[in-house]
């Protein structure tokens, strides 16, 4: 267990959530809806919303994984740390996939709060979100 994850537990930004496993399917459905919406936004050259929607697709995929372990997040940062702890450290998810989630979080904040977004970033995040969703479904089946 890494120190960042331990701190999330101590602050209760990650906590046990008995209803989590029952909500996994809904989170995966939300992830799929968000990636489909992102693709539509991309078609209309709305790259800001593409980036935001792809991040939330990845967020819901990650949340499904966390719920499956019987936990819930209270911060986006701690969600990422929980996925790192439960899945990367256990060898079920490659390090690069969690890094893609972290990068998507930063890009979403840039797009949402500062109006910083590009077509190239939107394309890259669509690919990452699709891979994250595919891997999440694989792990949850």
Image (cartoon, grey):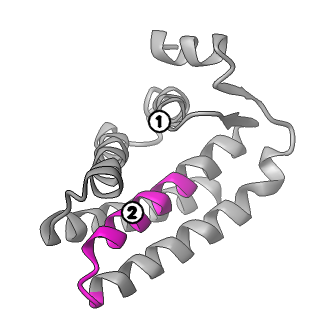
Does residue 15 lie above or below 133 as drawn?
above
Question: At x 26% / y 73%, what residue is drawn?
Answer: 47
Q: Residue at x 64, y 71 (%)?
A: 29
Q: Is residue 65 left or right of residue 12?
A: left
Question: Label 2 neighbourhood size at 10 Å, few (<14), some (14-19), many (20+)?
Answer: many
Residue that lies at the very extreme toward the front in this rendered image: 114
Q: Earlier in the sequence, mark 2 or mark 1?
A: 2
Examine the rendered structure and indicate whether residue 60 appears above or below residue 66: below
Q: Is 107 a magenta residue? A: no
Q: Quadrant of the C terminus?
A: bottom right
Q: Residue 83: x percent and y percent? A: 51, 36
Q: Which residue is mark 1?
A: 80
Q: In which image quadrant can residue 106 be found?
A: top left
Q: Is residue 18 left or right of residue 10?
A: right
Residue 52: which numbered mark, if any?
A: 2
Who's the residue at 57% across and 53% down the image? Answer: 139
Q: Main secondary structure of the magenta part?
A: helix
Q: Which residues are magenta?
A: 43-61
Left/right of residue 39 with respect to residue 138 in the rendered view: left
């Amino acid at each position: 267990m890494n120190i960042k994850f331990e701190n999330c537990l101590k602050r209760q930004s990650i906590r046990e959530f008995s209803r989590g496993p029952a909500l996994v399917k809904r989170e995966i459905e939300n992830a799929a809806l968000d990636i489909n919406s992102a693709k539509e936004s991309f078609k209309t050259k709305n790259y800001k919303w593409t980036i935001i929607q792809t991040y939330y697709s990845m967020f819901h995929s990650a949340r499904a994984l966390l719920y499956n372990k019987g936990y819930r997040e209270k911060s986006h940062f701690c969600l990422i740390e929980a996925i790192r702890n439960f899945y990367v450290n256990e060898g079920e998810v490659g390090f690069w996939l969690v890094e893609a989630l972290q990068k998507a979080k930063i890009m979403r904040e840039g797009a949402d709060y500062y109006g910083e977004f590009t077509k190239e970033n939107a394309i890259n995040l669509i690919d990452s979100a699709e891979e994250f969703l595919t891997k999440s479904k694989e792990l949850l089946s």
